[in-house]
Structure formats: structure tokens, C-alpha cells
Image (spheres, rainbow, N blue to C red):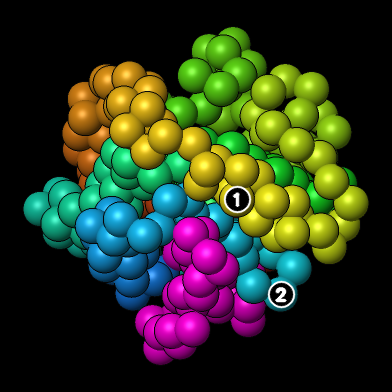
Amino acid sequence: MTDNPSMLRETREGAVAILTLDQPARRNALAVPMRESLVAAMERIETDETIRAIVLTGAKGNFSAGGDISGMEAPDLAAGRLRFRTTQRVVRGFIGSSKPIVAAVEGWCVGAGLGMALCCDTIAAAAGARFMAGFGKIGLIPDFGLLHTLPRRVGEGRAKQIFLHAEPMDAQAAHAIGLIDRVVADGTALDAAKAIAGRLAESAPLSIALTKSWFGQGLGEALEWERNIQSALFATADHAEGKVAFHAKRKPDFTGR
């Protein structure tokens, strides 16, 4: 087992690598150091032929509460674009990986955390899991590849409702619309995901890799649009107000600036 001080744990069970987002005090928020660790882990795993499948999960009862709002500092467009380089490498690393990836979701799977889950090929979620994309509440657009992945999962109409209304969705509702693939008992998502990954690890690797490559088409254009628009929104007054309101646990007062 590898313990990484930058918030990511990596373990191995046979041909399956298990990556655990490990910042439970912040509900496994995807801070920049965690994203950098995910990039490094995926680059290493991709070249390891003894690893045939991957499981991604979160520590201590939550998958991920999304981006680390306290670390969302990008004073201008150039700084925002620079910040998004790491995010793009994470998304490309997961969606473009030749290995099948299974997400094990317990608790909250929100915002960038939802984006992270949808970068995986199969999602097994506990009955008590909750999903939401609340970017509008902090003056931002959906990122982490969600504008590419979510419509492909649930259709454009449903994706638009999820993005615009930012309402929590339980696992049963998420399964009904195809957002997730399996609903399992609370506390068993990781075991279920490892079982799925174990079966996928027995498949022909090249067949898996080439099948996955088809579904990654069009990702680059979506990520570049996301990078430019989100970088501009980081510098707006509404985003600043959204962050203050979030930390103060009050309703934001947006002005459109």
C-alpha cells in the first residue's frame, strides 16, 4: 500500500488498483494536490501491464464533495487557464485510460466529484448516496468534463435540469435515469466495485481499450470550452459572492457581474 501525503491512497488487490480520495475532513474535496496525485497515479498505472482494472472511491463515507472552494483563487483569465491544466489532465487520464475504471460511491458525490465519478466507466453506488451539480450556486459552469459526460449518460434534457436546478438526487433516482449503473446496500459500494473490476480485469485488454477510445471522442473540444469559460467566471463578482455565501451558509445575492 502507498500512503500519499497529498490526499490520495493507492492499494492493490491482484490485477486491480484501488485509488482512494482521502481527505475525509473536507469530504474528499478535489483540491489541487489531490488532482496532481491522481494525474501521477494514472500515468503510472497506465504503463503497468499487470494492472488490468481500477477502482476509484472516497474515504470515510463520502465519494467527494467536489472542488475545494477555499482554493478557488484565479484573479485573471491566464491564471484560471493555468489552474485548469491539471483538471484537464485528470479528466483525460481517466476517460482516455486503456484500463476499465469502476467508481464506488458512498455518501455525497457533488460537483467536480460527480464529474470525477462520470470519468469512470461503471458506477456502483450505495443506496444512501446523493448526487448533485450545484455549480450555479457559486457562479460557475459545470466543469471536470461534466458537459461532455453527463449528457452522454442521461441525455441533454435531463442533464440540463440537473445543471440548472442543482437539486440533490438519491441513488434510486440516479439509477432510473442511467446516471449510475448499480445500486447496492450502504457500506458495500467498494466491495461491489472491486467485484466488478475483478471481472473486467479478466477481459481482453486491447478490446477494452479500443472500446473505451470510441467513447472519448469529442472530449477535447468540450474541455477547452470549459477551461476558457470557467477561467473567466473565476474572476467575476458573482463567483466571489457565491464563495462568501457558501462559507457563511446563506443564500447568495447574485448581480450578473
Seen at 46% across and 42% down, the residue is: 100
Nearer to us in this view, 182 or 118 = 182
The location of residue 230, given as percent across then percent down, is 30, 42
The location of residue 53, given as percent across then percent down, is 47, 50
Which stretch did the figure color magenta? Answer: 1-30
Residues at badges 1 and 2 in contact (C-beta under 8 Å)?
no
Marking on residue 256:
none
Is residue 157 visible from the viewing direction of this image? yes
Residue picked out by circle 2: 60
Seen at 68% across and 34% down, the residue is: 180
Residue picked out by circle 1: 198
The location of residue 65, given as percent across then percent down, is 60, 60
What type is the residue that disc 2 sits on? Lys
For this orientation, the residue located farthest to the left is: 78
Seen at 70% across and 59% down, the residue is: 190
Above or below, comparing residue 112 to residue 164 in the picture = below
State left or right for residue 187 relative to residue 108.
right
- Circle 2 sits in a helix, a strand or a loop, which is it? loop
User: How far apart are the two marked residues, 1 and 2, measured between alpha carbons?
Assistant: 23 Å
Is residue 138 visible from the viewing direction of this image? no
Label 2 crowd (10 A; few <14 / some 14-19 / many >=20)? some
Above or below, comparing residue 8 to residue 192 in the picture = below
What type is the residue that disc 1 sits on? Gly
Seen at 58% across and 48% down, the residue is: 197
**In the image, which is nearer the foreground, mark 1 or mark 2?**
1
